[in-house]
């Protein structure tokens, strides 16, 4: 038993990795990525429909710009191996279909709730807490759709020009992506605190963990196309399944990054990293 205790990890990174193995993070991330893959296209379609419905306030071409931006993102991530999936997404996003904000939103919300319940259950497992109910997942799903539409509209439009700010286009060009990154950090903070049932306090370590998750999301999204470009040459037999599998792997990396951030957050909290030191 003494020998076993000496082999326990002593570094913070070692403890985080040991906890990740104990909680079976790869399996949890795979489950969440599967449900996220089912929800991603209905959610994107609903976001574009919301932007289209707000067209009079945002501008006539806001929905077209939003659909174009999402399609370009999918083409960057999926590369040429996912051309079929990206083409299908472009067709869905650019077509105006009556009832998208009714049946489409209901379907998107249903799939998002299922995906978010998987995420919240995994975060509760990491934190050692009871999982949240479907109501929390539903609230997060509605917030994700509305927040995604807001961020998308802000990313493709120039709100400073609407407010008649001098040189608003130039200013917004520099502020747009930092604001998007801050929105992602805020979303990660919310999901971590809700899923891990964090009460008051611990804001500093939560923001640190959320910023680490967003950094991993950006790094994975930037490096993943290079990986796909190399692997696609060795896996030509994937055929039409290539785009879906590539999207699934990308979502797997994103969820795994979030769960590693949750493990880091738990480690920092357990070690009292957020407790202020007072002089004796």
Image: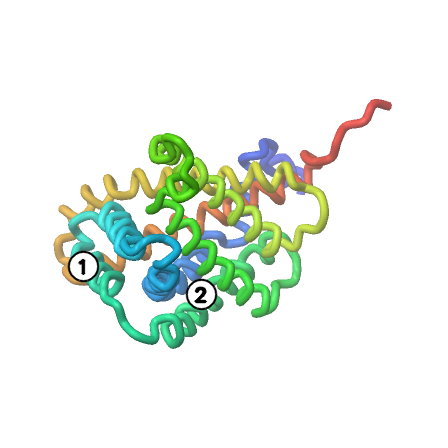
Q: Which sits in the foreground, 60 or 155?
A: 60
Asked whether residue 174 appears in the rendered view, the answer is no
Residue pictured at 40% horizontal, 68% vertical:
108
Q: Position of residue 188 (x, y in %)?
A: 52, 47
Q: Position of residue 48 (x, y in %)?
A: 34, 60
Q: Which sits in the foreground, 215 or 249?
A: 215
Q: Position of residue 127 (x, y in %)?
A: 62, 52
Q: Which sits in the foreground, 246 or 57?
A: 57
Q: Is residue 206 left or right of residue 271?
A: left
- The image's mark for residue 27 is none
| Secondary structure category for the residue under label 2 | helix
Residue pictured at 23% horizontal, 66% vertical:
95
Where residue 276 sits, quadrant-wise, is top right
The colour scheme is: rainbow
Question: Which image quadrant: the C terminus?
Answer: top right
Question: Which image quadrant: the N terminus?
Answer: top right
Where residue 181 sits, quadrant-wise, is top left
- The image's mark for residue 112 is 2
From the image, tell me which residue sits under label 1: 87
| Secondary structure category for the residue under label 1 | helix
Where residue 37 sits, quadrant-wise, is bottom left
Q: Position of residue 249 (x, y in %)?
A: 32, 53
């Amino acid at each position: 038993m003494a020998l076993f205790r000496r082999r326990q990890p002593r570094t913070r990174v070692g403890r985080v990795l040991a906890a990740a193995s104990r909680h079976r993070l790869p399996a949890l991330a795979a489950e969440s990525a599967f449900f996220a893959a089912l929800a991603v296209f209905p959610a994107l379609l609903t976001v574009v429909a919301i932007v289209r419905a707000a067209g009079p306030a945002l501008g006539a071409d806001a929905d077209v710009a939003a659909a174009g931006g999402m399609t370009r993102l999918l083409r960057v991530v999926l590369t040429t191996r996912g051309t079929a999936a990206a083409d299908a997404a472009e067709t869905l996003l650019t077509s105006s279909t009556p009832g998208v904000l009714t049946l489409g939103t209901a379907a998107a919300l249903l799939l998002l709730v299922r995906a978010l319940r998987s995420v919240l259950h995994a975060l509760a497992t990491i934190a050692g807490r009871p999982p949240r109910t479907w109501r929390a997942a539903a609230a997060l799903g509605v917030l994700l759709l509305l927040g995604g539409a807001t961020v998308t509209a802000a990313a493709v439009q120039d709100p400073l020009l609407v407010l008649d700010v001098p040189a608003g286009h130039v200013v917004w060009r520099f502020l747009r992506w930092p604001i998007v990154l801050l929105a992602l950090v805020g979303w990660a903070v919310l999901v971590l605190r809700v899923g891990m049932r964090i009460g008051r306090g611990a804001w500093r370590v939560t923001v640190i963990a959320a910023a680490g998750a967003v950094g991993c999301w950006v790094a994975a999204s930037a490096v993943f196309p290079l990986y796909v470009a190399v692997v696609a040459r060795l896996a030509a037999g994937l055929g039409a399944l290539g785009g879906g599998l590539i999207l699934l792997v990308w979502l797997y990396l994103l969820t795994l990054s979030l769960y590693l951030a949750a493990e880091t957050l738990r480690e920092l909290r357990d070690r009292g990293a957020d407790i202020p030191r007072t002089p004796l």
